[in-house]
Image: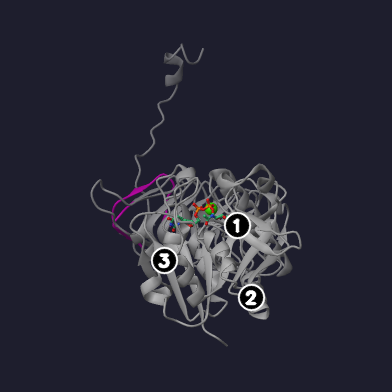
Amino acid sequence: MENRYVIILAAGKGTRMKSKLYKVLHPVAGKPMVEHIIDQVEKTNPSEVVTIVGHGAEAIKSHLGERSQYALQEEQLGTGHAVLQANSLLADKKGTTLVITGDTPLLTAETLKNLFDYHQGKNASATILTAHAADPTGYGRIIRDHIGIVEKIVEQKDATEQEARVQEINTGTFCFDNEALFNALSKINTNNAQGEYYLTDIIEILKKEGKAIAAYQMSDFEEAMGINDRVALALANKIMYQRLNKMHMMNGVTFVDPDTTYIDEGAVIGSDTVIEAGVHIKGKTVIGEDCFIGAHSQIIDSVIEDNVKITQSVVEESIVRKNADVGPFAHLRPKAEIGEHVHVGNFVEVKNATIAEHTKVGHLTYVGDADLGKDINVGCGVVFVNYDGKNKHRTTVGDHAFIGSSTSLIAPVDIAANSVIAAGSTITNDVSEYDLAIARARQENKAGYAKKLPYLNN
Ligand code: UD1
Ligand code: CA
């Protein structure tokens, strides 16, 4: 195969986004747009990828790392000027160069491969990836002559009324003969409505030099969508989430309402798992088979093993092992490790703690900075008091211990296996195996005293 090069345009600020974040770093289904682009581009096996950076150069480089080379465009003088910055890296090479804008995150590798093939088949100097738009507003228009041969691309702001009516648009992605590309780029100027060096102008230049220009029209306009503002961003997210949900459904995952279920790109879900409405699954989450993820749960960067039930809960950077159940209304904060068959019930918060198999933490409890063994029963309203105002301390609880309701375990403290803590205790000292610890004020009943309180009891 001949050499393939890719140039990704990502130097613009994205003024229309009205954002502090650089446009191509805005996430679509949890992943920055420009990362979607490079993911797809890599599947076409290019020998070199060059990303043009300017605004947010360092941030973009830290996202893409060594997956790309970089050329700096110090001033954003237009898309043609941007491509020209790759001159010293690519100009003398032979092969085909794909130029793609960093703001078209829905384009797939399949379309890019089709474009490469079409370009090669036509033996063209340039092939434009085009699409038919119901509403072409904002896009460059493909101008063809009376027999349908492409003549040029006209930007919206430079278009005559007649040209503006054309519905075939420039997607911003092209294949070029590499040498022809850099040759033509040296000839573009800024005589246009925006005073910019347009990449699109080189079509007319190549044409006038007698070079062959081709246009490959893709069938799905949505896939070509360029994200210039937040309205388009919201639409791109919607389309990407639908695409991902469909993929999960084809893999055997049940969705109660895919229209309101948001699963980030990169998440993995096993078959026969059921996901209810309003669920968000974010980051690098892995969910096993036969799980149930109840309505309005959020799961972020976590591992959920097989057959786990999570009901309306928030799970962050945690591990939930097989056959456990969590919620409703539980919050697993970073570094919670929930063992097999563990029950974490309603209004329970767990942070930086391990809970071994078959232990039950049923109600209204905070488990912070602790290691719990197996088969423990933690009563209602237990607080692992982990913070003295300055430092965090750990608590350990041994296997089969019983922690009565409304107990405070003041860390650091060790509760040995098979011990019992009486309800309402405030535990500050270690408890040995098989001991019963009671640490609460003794009750005193004053006989008949209630009668002396006539305002309460008469
Ligand atoms: C561009 C095309 C238009 C096409 C549309 C498709 C031109 C002149 N216009 O318009 O025909 O229909 O994309 O989405 O090419 N960039 C740089 N440096 C610059 C300017 C832009 O790197 O100096 C980058 C941006 O970061 C962005 C991409 O190029 O990723 C496209 O720029 P943008 O301003 O969005 O172009 P459009 O107006 O959408
Ligand atoms: Ca754009």
Tell me what residue is drawn at x 70 percent, y 51 percent: 167
Crowdedness of circle 2 by 10 Å Cα count: few (<14), some, many (20+)?
A: many
Does the stretch in magenta take in 419?
A: yes
Of the image marks 2 and 3, the number of the one nearer the N terminus: 3
Label drawn at residue 119: 2
Asked if residue 411 lies left or right of residue 29, the reply is: left
Question: Which label was assigned to residue 84?
Answer: 3
User: Tag 3, which secondary structure?
Assistant: helix
Is label 1's Cβ within 8 Å of ligand 1? yes
Q: Is residue 377 magenta?
A: no
Magenta segment range? 410-429
Q: Nearer the viewer, residue 414 or 350?
A: 350
Give the alpha-carbon distance from disc 2 to disc 1, as whole Å: 18 Å
Percent of width and height locating residue 49: 46, 74
Rendered position, 59 above or below 46: above
**Residue 220 coordinates in the image, percent (x, y):** 71, 60
Q: CA distance from mark 2 to mark 3?
A: 21 Å
Q: Residues within 10 Å of mark 1 (few under 14, many from 20)?
A: many
**Residue position marked by numbered label 1 in the rendering:** 153
Mark 2 or mark 1: whose residue is earlier in sequence: 2
Amino acid type shown at disc 2: His
Residue 107 x, y percent position in the rendering: 61, 64
Q: How many marks?
A: 3
In which quadrant is the N terminus drawn? bottom right
